[in-house]
Image (tube, rainbow, N blue to C red):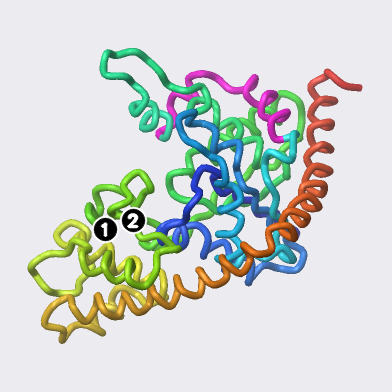
Amino acid sequence: MKNIYITGINGSAGRIHIGHYLGVLKPFVNLQKNKKKEDTLIAFIADLHGLTNPYVDVRGNSENLLLSLIASGFDFKKTLIFNQSDVSSHCELMWVLACQTTIGQLERMTQYKEKSQKFIMANGTNTIPTGIFLYPTLMSSDILLYNANFVPCGYDQVQHVELARDIAEKFNKKYGQTFILPKAIIEEKESKKIYSLNKPFEKKMSKSEPEGCLWMLDNNEEIEKKIKKALTDNLNIVHFDKSNQPGISNLMSIYQGITGLSYEQIEKKYKNSANYKEFKLDLISLLQKVCGKWRRKYFMWEKKKNMLKQILKKNAIKAKKIGDKKVQEVYKIIGIKK
């Protein structure tokens, strides 16, 4: 049976940190390695999603993000990679789906509730950008446009995949079988969630708090400095306990994500350590190797930007052919085309 997997990487991300790499990019690359011959993998740069916050300058982000995907192991030969904005059918289908969606459904989105609070001014004036409210319908379009069966994603996006499923189910009941009901797939590992090095298990690692971020483009000296300064505790026991030892547990999540070792195996390896020094030095060495290899690939492909642009254009044509066909099918089903 042929399956279609689709993922969109937010075009506003720009730089990639270790949380992005371990939580989203590395799992997709593993999927790419193990995919069946008949399966289709689609990964698009979600540059339109990057516009949801009008105060963020997105210039250059899509280009940097593409380089980050290639550096992480995304392969043009195995995955259809393109820019979302080069395929207009994403927006066309989005409007149709928005007309099938209620305000109540979108207001219940956890991401909307959290992000909208950031846009409430001190005097109480509501300044929430419309894109923050509507982007789940665009995400639904991204998925349903390609008849995707599975959506590899983070925990925070599962609700949006469920919305796409709800919209598809409602549409199918109203007009007849049109969309496949998609299913979110997430990797059941703690390394899916990497938190700030300064505020472990309080705030996710994020570009909004750069002092707690470990970027994939950080050099060896920066990596060493950040890991040595990373918050731990006075217990000096390498043990995974999010409640009582959040700092070392967060670093263990990074270690686990890189090596694939279980937490029990990591604990056993460092059970005779007098403090966290040995563990941190080993983690620094691991990160320097992983990020060093990543950086070299990133800068190598940076010199081949023109080649990448040509590949993206060809891929966008392929994606547009699929998307346009689906949109025309939908138009006929709802009755605005014959």
Q: Which residue is mark 1?
A: 197
Quadrant assignment, res 34: bottom right
User: Could you classify mark 1 by the number of other residues whose Cα lies within 10 Å: few (under 14), some (14-19), or many (20 or more)?
Assistant: many
The residue range painted magenta reads 90-110
Q: Secondary structure at mark 1?
A: loop
Quadrant assignment, res 171: top right
Instruction: Give the residue at x 67% y 65%.
Output: 75
Q: Which quadrant does the N terminus fall into?
A: bottom right
Instruction: Give the residue at x 20% y 64%.
Output: 229
Residue in front for this viewpoint, 68 or 131: 68
Residue extending furthest toward the front: 303
Q: Are marks 1 and 2 in contact (CB under 8 Å)?
A: yes
Quadrant assignment, res 300: bottom right
Q: So how many labels did they put on this image? A: 2
Establish if 35 lies above or below 5. below
Magenta stretch prevailing secondary structure: helix
Circle 1: residue type: Leu
- Residue 313 x, y percent position in the rendering: 78, 50
- Residue 266 x, y percent position in the rendering: 29, 78
> Of the numbered discs in the image, which one, if any, rests on residue 213?
2
Circle 2: residue type: Cys
Please tell me whether residue 103 belongs to the stretch shown in magenta.
yes
Instruction: Give the residue at x 55% y 33%.
Output: 51
Q: Secondary structure at mark 2?
A: loop
Task: Please give left or right for residue 62 compared with residue 281 in the image.
Answer: right
- Residue 200 x, y percent position in the rendering: 24, 55
Establish if 207 lies above or below 19. above
The disc, 1 or 2, on the residue closer to the chain's N-terminal end is 1
Residue extending furthest toward the left: 234
Task: Please give left or right for residue 12 compared with residue 204 in the image.
Answer: right
